[in-house]
Amino acid sequence: MKIGKETIPRSAICTSNEDTIVVRGKDLAQDLIGQVSFTDYFHLLVTGREPTPAATAVLNATLVAIAEHGLVPSVQASRMTLAAAPDALQGAVAAGILGCGSVILGASETCGIFLDEIRRRAGDGRDYDTAARQVVAEYRSAKRAIPGYGHPLHKARDPRVTALFNVAEKAGADMTFVEIANVVEQVIPDVVGKNLMLNVSAAIPAVLLGVGFPLSALRGVPILARTAGLIGHLTEEFSKPIGFALSYQATRNYVYDGEVPEGYTDDRD
């Protein structure tokens, strides 16, 4: 990413005067508060455009799909942080979000780039099969995981995939990227040598790109959704604290395999 050459900070998102707060050209108090959902507001903030009905339906569905996923690492980090600093809810939320990367929550962005590469490679001929085989083979040759495919629990398709695809189709979204995602799933066995089924990290970019959501903002969707999930877990943590129990589970199974001074004995043995 290039650093801009602007010497004056400029933004088209928000301004205000004594009487009015303006967000993306709208009067916050008159046009937005009580008039739009948070999903639509998020879309407006990110894109500068009011969403189409299809974009609203798809974006809302993706946020619901990825908000909660049990005691995954980001949630454990968040709950243990709150246990250690119960006066810092914001720090506990941040602890969970800071773990968002290529493995956790960032895979939707990576898969979006992957699917877009296939679309561009296919060109106007829309030969997605050939393009998918080429791109998957290149990932395979480079020993790169195919983002958005395979799941440790859902060996058949992740059930969220069908649900999101159905929402997109019913809403009248462009299904181009859904088609590409399906083609990839079909060619993977030939190229990779095993079945890897679609998971939610492929479904999210497939449906969002189909309603014009920016590729560069894809990672923001699971981050926003998981923030809601973390706040739910942290609210529960206040009344049913398990943060120290999670820490204990780790230390109970801890094995030190480094060197020790002469005469040292482990009292836990």
Image (spheres, rainbow, N blue to C red):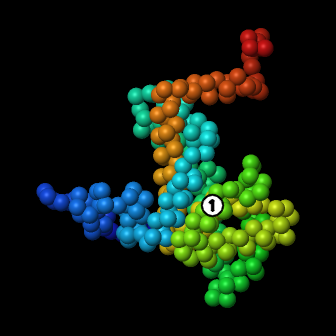
Residue 89 appears in which quarter of the rendering?
top left
User: Taking 123 as reference, is 137 left or right?
Assistant: right
Q: Residue 168 location in percent, x, y?
A: 57, 69
Q: Residue 231 location in percent, x, y?
A: 47, 40
Q: Nearer the viewer, residue 222 or 142?
A: 222
Q: Residue furthest left?
A: 18
Q: In the image, what residue occupies the spot 73% across and 59% down?
A: 157
Q: Residue 183 location in percent, x, y?
A: 73, 73
Residue 194 appears in which quarter of the rendering?
bottom right
The answer, for residue 218, to whether it is visible in the render is yes
User: Taking 158 as reference, is 176 left or right?
Assistant: left
Residue 148 appears in which quarter of the rendering?
bottom right
The answer, for residue 209, to whether it is visible in the render is no
Mark 1 neighbour density, 10 Å: few (under 14) some (14–19) many (20 or more) = some
Q: In the image, what residue occupies the spot 57% across and 52% down?
A: 66
Q: In the image, what residue occupies the spot 26% across and 63% down?
A: 31
Disc 1, SS: helix
Q: Nearer the viewer, residue 253 or 230?
A: 230
Number of numbered discs on residues = 1
Q: Residue furthest front?
A: 170
Say which amino acid is labelled 1.
Ala
Q: Name above or below for residue 218 compared with residue 249.
A: below
Q: Residue furthest bottom?
A: 125
Q: Quadrant of the C terminus?
A: top right
User: Taking 120 as reference, is 260 left or right?
Assistant: right
Q: In the image, what residue occupies the spot 47% across and 28% down?
A: 238
Q: Residue 136 location in percent, x, y?
A: 75, 70
Q: Give the labeled residue for mark 1.
A: 163
